[in-house]
C-alpha cells in the first residue's frame, strides 16, 4: 500500500449552491456519502469549512469532480469554474493532503437514479444528491488505476 491510501479520502462535488462531501475508508476501498455543505456566499469561507472538515476526518487526500464536456471531454465553462475554484482551494489544504481531479460527467444523473431506486423524494433528495454525486466521484477515482490494491 502506498502513502496515497494511508488515510481517509474525501470526495467533493462543488456545486454553485451546495458542496457534496463523501468519505472513504483508510484502505481506499469504499466511498460513502457524508454531508452537504451549504454555500455561504464566500468561497473563502467555504474553503475554510472544507479544510476544517479535512482535518476533522484526518483525510490524506481529496478528490474533486470536474464537469468536463459531455460531448468531447473538453474543459467547458463549468469545468473552468471548478478548476479556478480548485486553484484557490489548494491554499487551504492541510499540509501533506493531496488533491486529485476526477471527471464527473454523469455523476449527478447516477446519483438521481440511485435516489429514485431508493424512493427518496423532496427536501431529503436535494440534500442527498450532492453527497451521492461526491461518493460516485470518489469511488470512480478509487476504482481507477490510482489504487495500488486493485
Image (cartoon, helix red, strand yellow):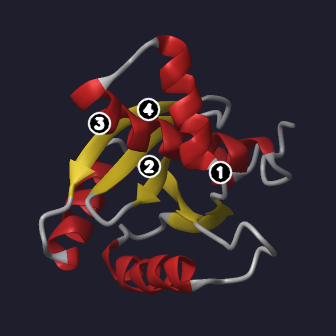
Dot 1 or dot 3: first in sequence order is: 1
State the residue position of label 4. 33
Residue 51 percent across, percent down from the top left: 29, 62
Q: Residues within 10 Å of mark 4 (few under 14, many from 20)?
A: many
Q: Which residue is mark 3?
A: 127
The mark that comes first in sequence, 4 or 2, is 4
Q: Residue at x 50, y 53 (%)?
A: 60
Q: Which mark is residue 106?
A: 1
Residue at 77% across, 74% down: 73
Q: Are marks 3 and 2 in contact (CB under 8 Å)?
A: no
Residue 79 location in percent, x, y? 56, 78
| Distance between mark 4 and mark 2 Cα atoms | 15 Å
User: Which secondary structure lies at badge 2?
Assistant: strand
Q: CA distance from mark 2 to mark 1?
A: 26 Å
Which mark, residue 59? 2
- Work out which quarter of the rendered image holds the N terminus and state it: top right
- Tell me if residue 34 comes above or below residue 1 in the rendering: above
Amino acid at each position: 500500500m502506498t502513502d496515497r491510501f494511508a488515510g481517509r479520502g474525501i470526495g467533493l462535488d462543488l456545486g454553485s449552491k451546495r458542496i457534496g462531501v463523501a468519505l472513504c475508508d483508510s484502505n481506499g476501498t469504499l466511498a460513502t456519502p457524508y454531508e452537504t455543505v451549504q454555500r455561504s456566499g464566500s468561497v473563502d469561507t467555504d474553503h475554510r469549512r472544507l479544510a476544517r472538515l479535512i482535518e476533522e476526518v484526518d483525510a490524506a487526500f481529496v478528490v474533486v469532480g470536474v464537469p468536463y464536456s459531455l460531448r468531447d471531454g473538453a474543459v467547458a465553462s463549468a469545468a473552468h469554474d471548478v478548476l479556478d475554484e480548485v486553484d484557490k482551494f489548494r491554499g487551504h489544504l492541510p499540509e501533506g493532503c493531496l488533491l486529485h481531479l476526477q471527471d464527473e460527467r454523469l455523476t449527478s444523473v447516477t446519483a438521481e437514479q440511485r435516489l429514485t431506486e431508493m424512493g427518496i423524494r423532496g427536501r431529503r433528495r436535494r440534500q442527498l444528491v450532492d453527497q451521492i454525486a461526491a461518493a460516485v466521484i470518489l469511488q470512480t477515482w478509487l476504482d481507477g488505476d490510482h489504487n495500488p490494491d486493485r
